[in-house]
Image (tube, rainbow, N blue to C red):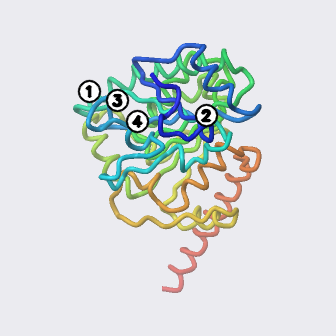
Amino acid sequence: MACADTRCRGAAMSLLQVNSDDLPDGPRLRAALERLPPGAPVVVMIHGFKFAPGSSSDPHRHILSLEPRRDCWKSVSWPRHLGLAGGGGLAIGFGWPARGSIWRAWRASARAGRRLSRLLTMLREVAPERPIHLVGHSLGARVALLALPGLPERTVGRIILISAAVFRTEATRLAVSPAGCSAEIFNVTGRENTLFDLLLRLAMPLGGRTLGQGGPSGRNWLDLPLDRSGPLLALRGLGYRISAPRARICHWSGYLRPGVWRLYRALLLTPARTPLPLLRNRLVADRERESAWRLAALRRA
């Protein structure tokens, strides 16, 4: 397992490619971390369904790469878009076997969550003062949440869940763990993912509501419905101009839409400038304003 993408020029960006069945040891983690300045975070990036290391859909040659393959329109470099360059932080691409049927990938995500938990434990051991954040898409969001049980509080700083393939009841249970209660969790949703939420519910009819319909209430949890004009206007007022959805159906909108990565970078790299209470207050205020506008429009009609 290489410590960094071989296409990285010098130490301008640190990218550690990791697979769930081949975790790095302590010395390898220390070597990857020693190039970073004090306080620079570690960001673990977790892919979703249909990827698997070593396959034709290898995430380390796709979204988790510095220079992803060019023959796929969904292939964008997460580490580059997160701005983890020039000592900005260590990007860890976490690969796990997510191919096959949805039921097979669902089972595999549970084991991947346990392996991610082990990786986070090792990171905390070798770098106890360094911030650790997670970002996961689709089933990768479930892997991120499943890593939380058993970890001590404050192991993880922030978690971004993008179009999460997670049921609300399970997320609620995982979020009340010590590590879950101390982390700040941002649940990115949009109506363009509704079909995929429906397909997950049809595959697992006993699961109930998905996080696409909103997550558990709590001071450390914030839903970011990026399909709605109110939240988009609120974020624009804070300096984050995110384009409206371009497609009615798109499972990948949460990381393909122009402007979203600037928000994600701010959430993970400069959390002091993006306090969750501030974001919550602005989103709630604009949601109430949007509701008032709609009510006034209905009355005029």
Q: Classify mark 2: helix, strand or loop.
A: strand
| Pointer 1 or 2: first along the chain | 2
Quadrant of the rendered image containing residue 285 = bottom right
Q: Nearer the viewer, residue 79 or 96?
A: 79
| Pointer 1 or 4: first along the chain | 4
| Pointer 2 or 4: first along the chain | 4
Q: How many C-alpha atoms fall within 10 Å of the one at disc 4: few (<14), some, or many (≥20)?
A: many
The residue wearing badge 2 is 90
Q: Classify mark 1: helix, strand or loop.
A: helix
What's the distance in space between the residues labelled 1 and 3, CA to CA?
Answer: 16 Å
The residue wearing badge 3 is 53
Quadrant of the rendered image containing residue 176 = top right
Q: Nearer the viewer, mark 1 or mark 2?
A: 2
The residue wearing badge 1 is 104
Q: How many C-alpha atoms fall within 10 Å of the one at disc 1: few (<14), some, or many (≥20)?
A: few
What's the distance in space between the residues labelled 2 and 4, CA to CA?
Answer: 15 Å
What's the distance in space between the residues labelled 1 and 2, CA to CA?
Answer: 31 Å
Q: Classify mark 4: helix, strand or loop.
A: helix
| Pointer 4 or 3: first along the chain | 3
Amino acid type, mark 3: Pro
Q: Nearer the viewer, mark 1 or mark 3?
A: 3
Q: Check the image and name the residue furthest to the front.
A: 10
